[in-house]
Amino acid sequence: MEKDFTRRTFIKGMAVGTMAGYLGAAGLSSTVFKNQLLPQEKLNQVDIGEIKALKIKVVSETSWYDNNVFLNDVKGAGGLLVNQYTIPWTCAGVAAGYQGSNLGGFSTYIEATLMDGKVMKIHFDTGWNPAWMEKRFREEGVAEKLAKKEIDFMVLSHEHIDHFFGLEATLKFYPDIPLYVPKGFYQEGFDFLKGKSFPAANAINNIPHRGKMTVLDSSKVNILYPGIALMTFDVPIILRVFGEQAFVFNVKDKGLVLVTGCCHQGIISYMEEVRKKVKGGEKIYAIEGGLHISPFEDWDPQYDDLIMAFNKYGVQKIGCNHCTGFITAEKMHKAGLPVIKGTARNMTKRDIYLGNGDELAIA
Amino acid sequence: MSHQVLDTLFLEERKFTHIIKQPVVRGVVNVLLAFAFFMALWWVFMDPRGWLRWYTPQYGYMYIRWLLIVAIWQVYIFNFWPFKIEWLEKTHPLQKGLIMIGINFAITGILVWVFYYWIFGKLAIPYFSWPELKKTGLSDFFSREYSSLAILMMAAIASWLSPIWPSAFENYPWHRLQQPAKGFTVLAVTFLFTTYAYFIFMHPHYRVLFYPWQEYTAAFPWWYESFRTLSGNFNVGWIMCATVSVWLTETILEHYPFRLVEKQPWRGLAGFAFILLLAWILFFTFTFMQDMVWGVSVEGAKRLMAPDWRYLHNGELAVILLTVALALYFYFDNWPRKFSTEVNLLVRVAIVIVGAWGLHWLYYKFSPGLLGTQAGYSHPQQFPMAPVILFINVMLYHGWFMDCWPGRRIRKES
Ligand SMILES: [Fe+2]
Ligand SMILES: [Fe+2]
């Protein structure tokens, strides 16, 4: 308890108050004048080389068929932070699904022509429902190329259900396929690769992966071949997943092309990282793949921030799909962004973006 | 307070018998007990590996926020009414804790389910009600998440505005009223301000949350031009800094320096202004620190680089700071108290800054294992404020309802 109010305490109070005011002013000025005060951004661009041409085929971008069924699975399990290996994903009795299963999957087939004419064939992600994935792999000729070991390697973008649980559909044709995974896989993921199943989550794999596996981390731009690179991001992701990687291709006379799985790191964050780390990154020519904006047709004002800022980057072709979401695609069209339309075939519901079986060629 | 204090709370009149004599041991034992109780609550209600798993995340987070504001009402606004002082003095802390925590949970449940879901959401604004939003065709899951965010934001604003009246204004001009008239009056007034503040700071967020934009019912987020985001997280961030400031002045800062203002309502107004100033100091300092560590945020970016996440993280950092301050206040007798006020305050501020640094490190290092959350700073569906505020709730239950028993107990003065 304080004694009576005196002049001295008042002066001291004023002194403390002034100090607080000073600190406040410092905070404010440091924010307003941060361009002067903050260390200058250093660009550390790597030359990844060039390729002649790039062909990207959407094998499957439909990860699940009924949003409400998917979200009820999530809700029933306890929300967006629950471990994906423990959730009983619905794979029967869904009218909109494939043979009653709600599960589809994400997979992209890429052909990159090197400067010497050699064509690198890349299997990007392996989807979710093995039955659906096998059907799509056969329909798009991927199964045949896998069986003949014509495909050079497989890249897993991240550990998510819809990009990874369909593993058996790939290993069935090519069990020793060389594989790149991003740093951040959990032990369950490595076990699954070795042939362990997670029946509680309807994740079955009876074929162990026997090929070479390389884990890539975020310490540098990982150049696989001249003009073909992967960048890894240390991001925590919903359903207890960590880390995602995505492609950077450098197509001669066109520029950089980013090919993503889900892009949980955020497409603008991704473009910013490319700008800082890859030669030619100031200008992205094209983007293809999932942009993880409104995968459940959900919304957040932050996503409008993204769409409103997107135009500034001057991307010329946007071949988005999958977890980009239909709402996002509609808003992007409205904002004048060059989103490429698809053909709405093979279970892709709308032609608003590139769907199953659609192709984007850059040369 | 120096002079002419208009109104004091029962909290400030309590005298204690120290059951555990050694102060550091007492503090540490109490912290560990509070932590154990927190972990039990987290496991039962929140943990994504636990029992009820309400941390979906917004749904459980909403309850945590409301438990906090209801506790503030119980103790600061109603001054423990309807319980009598004699009852509070003679009843065993464990029994008091059970009863008052029970009431705390019950009022929270009634507010969410009856007031928001069945009345306000049904008859006024659907986004305040999980069932009403669902009826519009939204998914069950996001109906619950969106409505939870709206409801929890009411609580966030209330946790800044409600305690200001008893704390800075000493309930002026209603200080002479008896309970419960005083409680209901102050509750009504502060909740009126909270409601206005909600519609200014958070309702515009809901204009752009739904598709298409709800331009006839809510203003465009007026902060967009200056703060480069449409998200209400900008307001969440600074309002959390303001909430933290209220409680810093109430605890380690002992209402200093605005208590030197002689008369109400001027003391209250000075307090309000000081709290706002302190909030903005925290907010800009944290923004600047993040700019230093991660570089300036980028419009439209996600995660670490997103302007709206940075603002939210300002609030998260502020709440971590407050946790340390409250632990010092409740469990270590607001040490030190032996020097002049200014020195006491400065030493406490230094302790809290260092402690917050430590807690920050501990939180991000151990939360994945302990809380079942994900490693990393910026997660789109993870809000460190939820567990941290739940721990604060536990400290408040412990300190307010249970007199920090078994470290100490109330001593009867009659
Ligand atoms: Fe995906
Ligand atoms: Fe994903």
Image: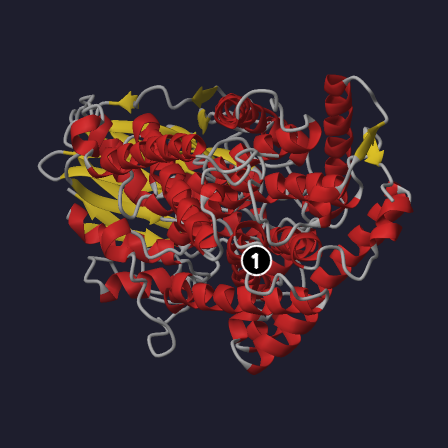
Instruction: Look at the image and name its color scheme.
Output: secondary structure
Closest to the observer, A19 or B48? A19
Instruction: Report whether A22 appears left or right of A181.
Output: left
Residue at position x 12%, y 34% in the image: A252
Q: Could you classify mark 1 by the number of other residues whose Cα lies within 10 Å: few (under 14), some (14-19), or many (20 or more)?
A: many
| Residue that badge 1 annotates | B155
Instruction: Report whether A185 appears left or right of A206.
Output: left
Q: Look at label 1 and name its amino acid.
A: Ala
Residue A112, quarter of the rendered image: top left
Residue at position x 33%, y 70% in the image: B219
Residue A266 against residue B28 in the figure, above or below: below
Residue at position x 30%, y 54% in the image: A305
Chain ID, mark 1: B
> Is there any visible trace of residue A106 in the rendered image?
no
Residue B146 against residue A26 in the figure, above or below: below
- Counting from the top left corner in percent of width and height, residue A143 is at 45, 42
Quadrant placement of the C terminus of chain A: top left
Dot 1 falls on a residue whose secondary structure is helix
Instruction: Report whether A48 appears left or right of A236.
Output: left
Residue B368 against residue A300 in the figure, above or below: above
- Counting from the top left corner in percent of width and height, residue A345 is at 39, 64
